[in-house]
Image (cartoon, rainbow, N blue to C red):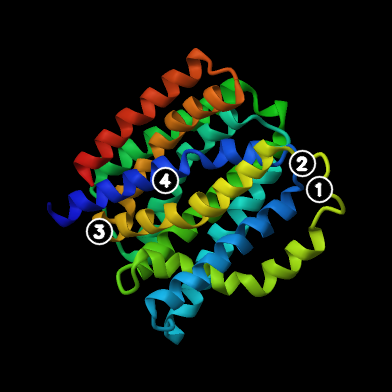
Amino acid sequence: MERTTRGWLNGMIGVVIFSGSLPATRIAVMDFDPLFLTAARAVIAGLLAVGLLAWRKARRPGREDLFPLAIVAIGCVVAFPLLTAMALQYISAAHSMVFIGALPLATAIFAVLRNGERPRPAFWVFALLGGSLVTGYAFAQGLTASPLGDGLMLCAVVACGFGYAEGARLSRTLDGLQVISWALVLSLPVMLPLAAWEMPRTWDGIGVPAWLGLAYVSLFSMLIGFVFWYRGLAQGGVAAVGQLQLLQPFLGLALAAALLHEQVTTLMLFAAVGVFTCVAGTRKFA
């Protein structure tokens, strides 16, 4: 199997894992405070990362790697989880999933700015079309319904796109597991005290679904998914493989409907099918 094909395969596995992140977060914030949830998931994943790095006897990152790792930590470990958790207090998981369709465009832009990638012009046509479908859907649903929730989701997308592109650049010299693991380790000195400070005074009233949501976002969304995702971005190209994120709304909508019994409208499905078509286009012209 050629390197590019492996990149798309690894990227798709990452997207499937990430598609459960927002529904799981939506479940968790029903009982957990967003700030505690963000810190707790980073701490749990960070402690696991310490163990994995020690088990693999991984070398320490060089000085030149520290700044990119800090960007990954800020964008993917802190900003995106916190902003989405806050947003999901105001909007549904189904509504938020469609905003993720703008993430590939943000990732591609940062890939050009930071990684020097140069996709063909047709790639940008499909990428912009996919982003436009997401934006059009949001307006059709009525952004005035929760401007704060939508604004938080847009900020989360920008922060995550930057973290994705920077992490993929690092994955050329460090593997995907080391990139996310060292980013999580860097975040521990901040997130560990924050988790302790924000810890609920009592655990009474926190249901099993919230605990399961916390477990999912800690283990899969914060660690395992990134291993496949960064590996895929490094193998197949950040701008190209990043467009697989356009499929995440489609998968997430199905999960939101199955797990949260949220309504999936015909307009949502049309938007999801549209972005699926755009992924095919960007794959062809990347």
Residue 145 or residue 208, whichever sits in front: 208
Residue type pointed to by label 1: Trp
Observer able to see residue 89: yes
SS assignment at label 2: loop
Q: In this figure, which residue is indicated by the disc labeled 1?
A: 203
**CA gap, disc 1 to disc 4?**
40 Å
Q: Reading the chain from its start, which is encountered first: label 3 or label 2? A: 2
Q: Reading the chain from its start, which is encountered first: label 1 or label 3? A: 1
Q: Reading the chain from its start, which is encountered first: label 1 or label 4? A: 4
Q: Reading the chain from its start, which is encountered first: label 4 or label 2? A: 4
Whether residue 136 is situated above or below residue 69 in the rendered picture: above
**CA gap, disc 3 to disc 4?**
19 Å
Q: Reading the chain from its start, which is encountered first: label 3 or label 4? A: 4
For the residues labelled 3 and 2, say whether their Cβ atoms are less than 8 Å apart: no
Residue type pointed to by label 2: Ile
For the residues labelled 4 and 2, say whether their Cβ atoms are less than 8 Å apart: no
Q: Position of residue 285 (x, y in %)?
A: 21, 42
SS assignment at label 1: loop
The image quadrant of residue 244 is top left
Q: In this figure, which residue is indicated by the disc labeled 3?
A: 235
Relative horizontal placement of residue 32, taking residue 259 as reference (left or right): right
Whether residue 57 is situated above or below residue 184 in the rendered picture: below
Q: In this figure, which residue is indicated by the disc labeled 2?
A: 206
For the residues labelled 1 and 2, say whether their Cβ atoms are less than 8 Å apart: yes
> In the rendering, which numbered label is found on residue 105?
4
Q: Residue at x 42, y 18 (%)?
A: 270
**Total numbered badges shown on the rendered structure:** 4
Q: Position of residue 87 (x, y in %)?
A: 68, 40
Characterize the local packing of mark 2: few (<14), some (14-19) or many (20 or more) Cα atoms within 10 angstroms. Answer: some
Q: Residue at x 73, y 62 (%)?
A: 195
**CA gap, disc 1 to disc 3?**
44 Å
